[in-house]
Amino acid sequence: MKKILISGIMVSFLIACSSTRITSSWKADNITARQYNKILVLGLINEPDRTVREEMEQHLVGDLKDMGYTAVCSCDEFDPKAFDKMNEKEALAKLSKSGIDAVLTVVLLDKEKERYYVPGRVSYTPYSVYHRRFWGYYSTMYSRVYSPGYYVTDTRYFWESNFYDLGNGQELLYSVQSQSFDPASAKKLGDEYGQLIVKDMVKNNVLANRNEVKLKPM
């Protein structure tokens, strides 16, 4: 019989890993990638720490620039409340004045936290190996029951990004929803998200990889 043992180190490694995946995406019919004068990446992220918004915007901007597009993040181009108390006409005029003709939004739809207990020792051994003798059973179960464990809190982010062509009646060309599970850091989250979304936009012919940059596999 084989003994399957997952050590505390491996459990910690699995918990520390982060991932972002697309859950659904949509694009307008009969669109082809074209050059834009200036793409604004605009985050709507209500987090106490502004680092999350800045990392999400800046990584997307970096990935767009790598592909040959001129892109800017709202955290650099405008004040956090630059469009507050503006009407539609005023906001569009402000964007036009800055030379922006497309907007890629990054919206944090929801955020969930889940707390669970990780046993100090996670193992499985078929009972036939040790249950026939009292001490074998007792010592194995004692170790499993009384080894100290710990609590872990995982965080799941739910995202949505939309791409609008401001030069074509503010038309929505692309929309994508995704989830990020327990990111290791804001920087890692931004890097993963930027690569994933830009790669999907190229795949769907919303944008073109003009510099033929090799995007990292996700």
Image (cartoon, rainbow, N blue to C red):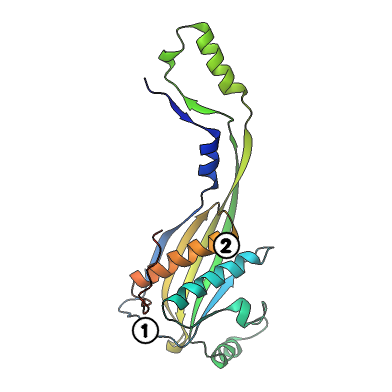
- Name the residue type under label 2: Lys
Residue 22: where, in percent of width, then height? 43, 60
Q: Is residue 47 above or below residue 174?
A: above
Residue 75's quadrant in the figure? bottom right
Q: Secondary structure at mark 1?
A: loop
Residue 152: where, in percent of width, then height? 61, 41
Q: Which of disc 2 and disc 1 is earlier in sequence?
A: 1
Give the quarter of the figure containing the N terminus: top left
Residue at 52 percent of width and 7 percent of height = 134
Residue at 45 percent of width and 66 percent of height = 195
- Name the residue type under label 1: Arg
Query: Is 165 or 218 nearer to us in this picture?
Result: 218
Q: CA distance from mark 1 to mark 2?
A: 29 Å
User: Is residue 24 shown left or right of residue 85?
Assistant: left
* Residue underneath mark 2: 187
Is residue 176 visible to us here?
no
Residue 212: where, in percent of width, then height? 35, 75
Residue 114: where, in percent of width, then height? 59, 45
Give the quarter of the figure containing the C terminus: bottom left
Query: Is 156 or 89 nearer to us in this picture?
Result: 156
Q: Is residue 111 above or below residue 214?
A: above
* Residue underneath mark 1: 34
Q: Residue furthest top?
A: 133
